[in-house]
Image: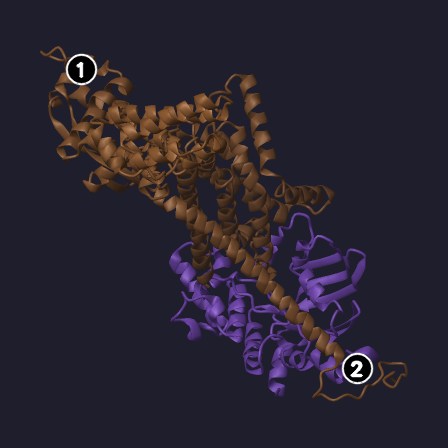
Chain colours: A purple, B brown
Amino acid sequence: MDDLRRIERTADMNDTKISAKGVQVFYGETHAIKDVSVEIGDKTVTAFIGPSGCGKSTFLRCLNRMNDTIDICRVQGSITMDGQDIYDPRVDPVQLRAKVGMVFQKPNPFPKSIYDNVAYGPKIHGLARTKADLDGIVEASLRRAALWNEVKDRLESPGTGLSGGQQQRLCIARAVATAPEVLLMDEPCSALDPIATAQIEELIDELRQQFSVVIVTHSMQQAARVSQKTAFFHLGHLVEFNDTDQIFTNPQDTRTESYITGRIG
Amino acid sequence: MSDANLSGATPIRKSSLLEQSALTRKRHRTGTVLRWLGLGAISLVMFFLAVLLWSIVSRGVPALFQYQAQIELYYDPAFLNPNGGEVTPEEIGGINLRTGFERGIFTSSLRRTLENAGIDIEATVASRWTAEALTALNGAGLANAEAVIEAAGSSADAAQRLGQAGSALRAAGAALDADDAEAALAARDTAAQALADLGFDEAASVVAGIAIADGAAALTATGYQQALLDAAGALRQPAQFDDAALSALIYATNRRDVRDRLVENPDLIGTTDATGVPIDISVTRYLSGELSGVGTAQMPPGFDIGQLALVDAMQEAGLISNAFRWHFFTNPYSQSGEIAGIGPALMGSAYMMLVVLVFSLVFGVAASIYLEEFAPKNRLTDFIEINIANLAAVPSIVFGILGAAILFTLMDLGFGNSIRGTALLGGIVLSLMTLPTIVIATRSALKAVPPSIADAALGVGASKVQMVFHHKLPLAAPGILTGTIIGIAQALGETAPLLLIGLSVSTGAALLSSPFAGGLLEQAQSMPTVVYLFAQNQDAPVREGLAQSAILVMLVLLFALNILAIILRRKFERRW
């Protein structure tokens, strides 16, 4: 990474998009997230790293209330987006999830056509009035996900017929299509080969122009490559949250240092 | 520091890889035994399946064909219009079907047809009985019996003379056993004389040679007495042959149609009409070779060899054809196998399946979606779940009792009889029975949809209802369809509950009208109950033929349903 880009990145990190304060998550009796506070900037890639089971995915799923679908999960503390509490009883999670898109670990396109995969979100949220509108959204989303050129001739073929990397980009296109403000990515590259991973990482860097991106990753190299901010989770605690450069070059906490040097994890 | 070198771990054994250890051999043996057991079980199942199919097909398929007598029906003016002049439709309509039309038109037409074909009915019957008498006489060693019968002139005379000789022998037998030696000798000689008078000289000398000491046993041992009496009986039979015996050969199934046609158009009187009239169903067993016609056990019940001789003659003359029993699929149930059919039963079953499909699919899928996706997981829903699973194992007759209870309640409320034995009630009862099957199938199909699809849908902001209806349900559809079709196929074959709610007694039910025109509320029959009725019929050909035919139709339907399930499944699964 050259210095020029690094400067450019820091210049973009201005205001906070999501602010979490004192978040506690319980799965039944298990205390999964312990008092996590984090500020996620707009037009920034924030990476959550940490060993397996440290709660980074759980915390990510709090940000678009996907945890609501788990009966035994309880969330305490406050998470605000643009100053509004997303756990306010008046907030409809359905509306929230249109604003906070999500990409999952395993590519999970719907068993429908490529077109329908991308068009589904805009359709249910009423984002397109005409078929032409919808076509435009689909094309734009696929272009943003760097998939358009590969699939433009076979939009009606099943999304499940694409390769793993293409499927994941299709999922990104699907998430992008609802015009979210934040994009959550839960280990988006863990099921992909290095080439597909490189494509997705490049894509993430480009997506940062429009969205605030939060990415959970197991790979410290990936976090170092794509993110500007990094949060290190350990055993449900947020150990350290800082600029990515700082975390990797000058960690403040010994646990962070042990993890990034490969001694725990 | 790890404990890799901890002592007390599994001891290291030295052994050759080329030799099987005892334990390995034992494991292989177990595997072989299990493999053979499995193979044996499968073979046994296949064997029983083959036997079952064979017994159904070998009886059911021939029963789908019916022997018919090709008759020139003659609308005899002498019978229909005995007084001459103008005949009114009312007069024709007033003629009794069984005593009038059957004899007056059908039997006389049969006689006419036979005569036209060059068959002398009386001679055919008589010659068969004469042959029977000859067989009896020759069997007993009474040589030149043919000449004796011919010498008697008519068969009636021959019967009388043979009978007298038989009686004389019986008297001699009785006398021989008595203590009076003189009377015994006299009776013996009288009997011998009777035989000699007939022309059985050899037999006469045999009887005359029987000593008193030999007793009646010696006389009986000759077999003359039995043969003479049998022959006399056989020779008396042709005189008994009358219209009733002729009429019994055919089943005048279409006599009502014929009467209706004549009522409509009296101008037909005096014309002829070639038609096929079913042969009596007991006789068909003789025609199909199932009964040989020799001896009492091989005789169609209620028939004698004279009638069979006529049947043989008709067959020789090409008057009997074997045609497919099309009316089996349209006619209503009847005690008489000749005209019995499964038409209303097929319709009734179809209507019930329709009711089952609507009720159990709608309620079943709705219940499953609620339980699977929306219901809170607590003790109450656990309880409901357990009970649904148990419901699937409840014997079907219990559902029948439930249906009967509904019926009685409705009767108390005043509209019970209108619903008794209807397809609607039957369908509701069968729906209750099918519901658990569909609920279980639907829930497992919904469970089988990968959670990642639900995540994906929720992730783009679909509501739970949208997630279920846009994504989960379409993916679960093949499973739901299969479950539904299996449930419906199960319901199609269910008998016990239907017997309890009156579908077996509605034997008079005719073809139903369309479901939209109230067909669901008419008296209905169903396939399984008709099979049950067929299997209880008094006539063996119905019990062992038509019942199998009806079962065959049911099996074909079930097979078609299962094929449909597979096709639908394939079609929906192949899409992606």
Which quadrant of the figure contains the N terminus of chain B?
Answer: bottom right
Q: CA distance from mark 1 to mark 2?
A: 113 Å
Hey, which residue is sitting farthest front in the picture?
B182
Labelled disc at residue A257: 2
Residue occupying the point 72% across, 74% down: B26
Residue A155 vs B190, above or below: the answer is: below
The reply to the same-chain question for discs 1 and 2 is no
Hey, which residue is sitting farthest left in the picture?
B85
Q: Label 1 crowding class (10 Å Cα cut-off): few <14, some 14-19, many 20+? A: some
**Which residue is tagged 1?**
B89
Q: Nearer the viewer, residue B568 or B74?
A: B74
Q: Nearer the viewer, residue B468 or B65?
A: B65
Residue occupying the point 43% across, 56% down: B567
> For residue A212, what is the image quadrant?
bottom right
The chain letter for the residue carrying disc 1 is B
Secondary structure at badge 1 equals helix
Residue occupying the point 12% across, 23% down: B268
Provide residue B239's location: percent of width, then percent of height: 26, 24
Provide residue B45's location: percent of width, then percent of height: 54, 56
Q: Nearer the viewer, residue B506 or B552?
A: B552
Left or right of residue B540, residue A257 in this image: right
Left or right of residue B190, residue B17 in this image: right
Residue A48 vs B217, above or below: the answer is: below
